[in-house]
Image (tube, rainbow, N blue to C red):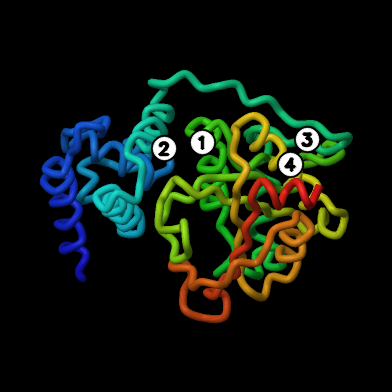
Amino acid sequence: MSAAARRAHWRDLVERRLPEAARPDWPVRLDHCFGRILLDHACGGPWRDQVRPPAHATLPLDQLETAIALGEAVLAGHADLALLNRRSLAWRGKIPPAPVPAIRDGGLILSRWRPEDAAPFAALNADPAVMAHFARPRTGAESAAEAGLLDRRFVADGFGPWALEHDGRFVGFAGAMRILRPLPFPGGDRPGSTVELAWRLAREAWGRGLATRAARLALADLAGRCGIRAVVAFTAVGNVRSRAVMERLGMAPSGTFPHPAVPEGPLREHVLYRLDGADREEAA
């Protein structure tokens, strides 16, 4: 389908289909409110901070597809519109953020992201060894945008991927985040309802148990402070290091799936792992 057709699809979705389908229990009923919620999620924050209006004409097509997929999930009853609205309002400062205290374990600190994390995070994302199981390394601009997206998840949900500091140095991130793009595995088709555990560490931090240690701290905080005990994790099938971390955490393999955001090739097939409360207690 052409770009013009996809942009027309977006306008029809927001201006006609969602308002006509509005239910009494939905928090919004007007087209501009649906647009706000979906566009904010496509951009990972207030959309006007990143995109010049009108969004239907200027939003990059990959982000437009994200917004369309989320809107279709709302229509199908697969996405919680109230949750999405709360996240959008939190990004816009309409809901006071809850305090998110840092986590300390000896020389390892899990905290919100800071401006000084930008340079070492960019170096991490530019390292071909670190990014071997991604389509390509990140540019500096892409890395800065990703750091902002990761930190804004704390604003939206009260949890997110923590910036990791070990012995005074930034070494990567580890933590949890809601899956907001439909993915082809059970639960992945319900954006916002499934929580992913993820990590990415600089090469000099490998082989020291830091990913497992940080992930365990993040899981304990997620369960104790946020009441979330079930998570998934996934990676390219050939990523032996990350799969080993998942298994050390007590996660169980749960099949494979083709990741829709990864181009055709050896990295597209991903392996899925799951952890629920009972699994975690056994692993502990």
Q: Earlier in the sequence, mark 3 or mark 4?
A: 3
Left or right: where does residue 151 sit relative to residue 278? left
Residue at the disc numbered 4: 164
Amino acid at pointer 2: Gly
Which is nearer the eye, 189 or 125? 189
Amino acid at pointer 3: Ile
Tag 1 secondary structure: helix
Residue at the disc numbered 1: 152
Q: Taking 213 as reference, is 224 above or below it?
A: above
Amino acid at pointer 4: Leu
Which is nearer the eye, 114 or 271? 271
Q: Earlier in the sequence, mark 2 or mark 4?
A: 2
Q: Which residue is found at the position 14% from the left and 40% from the top?
A: 19
Q: Which residue is found at the position 38% from the left and 43% from the top?
A: 41
Q: Taking 241 as reference, is 57 above or below it?
A: above
Amino acid at pointer 1: Arg
CA separation in Å, label 2 and label 4: 23 Å
- Badge 1: residue crowd in 10 Å (few <14, some 14–19, many ≥20): many
Q: Earlier in the sequence, mark 1 or mark 3?
A: 3
Give how far across and how far down residue 219 sits, in percent. Answer: 69, 42
Contact between marks 3 and 4 (CB within 8 A): the answer is yes
CA separation in Å, label 3 and label 4: 6 Å
CA separation in Å, label 4 and label 1: 16 Å
Residue at the disc numbered 2: 45
